[in-house]
Amino acid sequence: MASVLSDCAYLGAIDHWKWIHGYLRRSGVECDVVIGTALVDMYGKCGSVERAYEVFKEMPKRDTFAWTAMISAFSLHGYSKEAFDTFEEMEAVGVKPNHVTFLGLLSACAHSGLVEKGRWCFDMMRRVYLIEPQLHHYAFMVDVLSRAGLFEEIHGNIELGERVAQYLIDLEPRNHAFYINLCDIYAKTGRFDDVKRIRALMKERGIRKEVAGCSMIEVDELVLEFSVEGWPVLVMDETVLVSNLFNNEIKGEGTMHYCDGTLLDAQN
């Protein structure tokens, strides 16, 4: 059941996850820590943070993964205060965070421009919990500092990030994620020549992303995928039409209204 919930979170299938949660309630299935965590993760990724929090508070037992899922849900949607309040509660009850917990906190700092909080997280992760920063942590820290214009401090983090990335690349030279994360660090600091260098290295070594970038939306209970490899033609045509109508509305070139559930342009 937890794997089904995880799939729904990945797909963003709103009607599906509502039905599954209702089924769990009706059937009397015990909501243990694994299912509870999956529900929190699912609701968080699908945009229902309040419902994620309700499920979280109802859980009789919460482990590191459950607390981390809630913190990540808050962070994903810009609720930085709530993310840090949850982390304080986590510490107060004696649950130890892991490296993903700090990814969530650093993400919250990046979204909200919390420089001092970001530094505090980075220091606590290493000094208190003895967690060595990984490439993702450096990427978020660079993001936090770059938004505040602290480029001298960024330089130090980039050097550390580069060393970590090179170590990981040497360890797993076929793993595309390490190259992509390093490119992200370079791009956030304007080092586009280095971005080109890393991408050229990937091309030389024949390394490509295993999964093409994509987005998924649910239309009439059917999950549709849009990716660089292709998309549903009919839905794409409709998407382009609506996009153009919104563009005209923003420019003041037309007026949109609905008629029998259909979006219309007053000029056409």
Image (cartoon, rainbow, N blue to C red):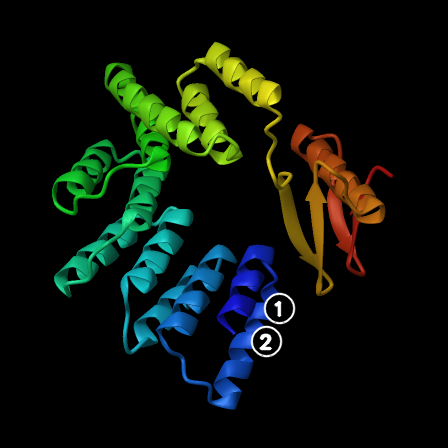
Residues tagged 2 and 1 counted as in contact (Cβ below 8 A): yes
Q: Position of residue 3 (x, y in %)?
A: 52, 67
Residue 117 falls in image quadrant: top left
Nearer to me, 125 or 236: 125
x, y percent for residue 83 = 29, 52
The local secondary structure at tag 2 comes to helix
Name the residue at 37% across, 38% down.
111
Query: In the rendered image, is residue 146 in sight?
Result: no
In the picture, measured across the screen, residue 5 lies left or right of residue 33, that is right
Circle 1 residue: 15
Q: In the figure, 97 relative to 122: above or below? A: below
What x and y, as percent, mark residue 31? Answer: 40, 79
Residue indicated by mark 2: 19
Secondary structure, mark 1, is helix
In the picture, the quarter occupied by the C terminus is top right
Residue at 33% x, 28% y is 164
Amino acid carrying label 2: it is Trp
Q: Residue at x 72, y 38 (%)?
A: 243
Q: Is residue 136 left or right of residue 184?
A: left
Q: Residue furthest top?
A: 193
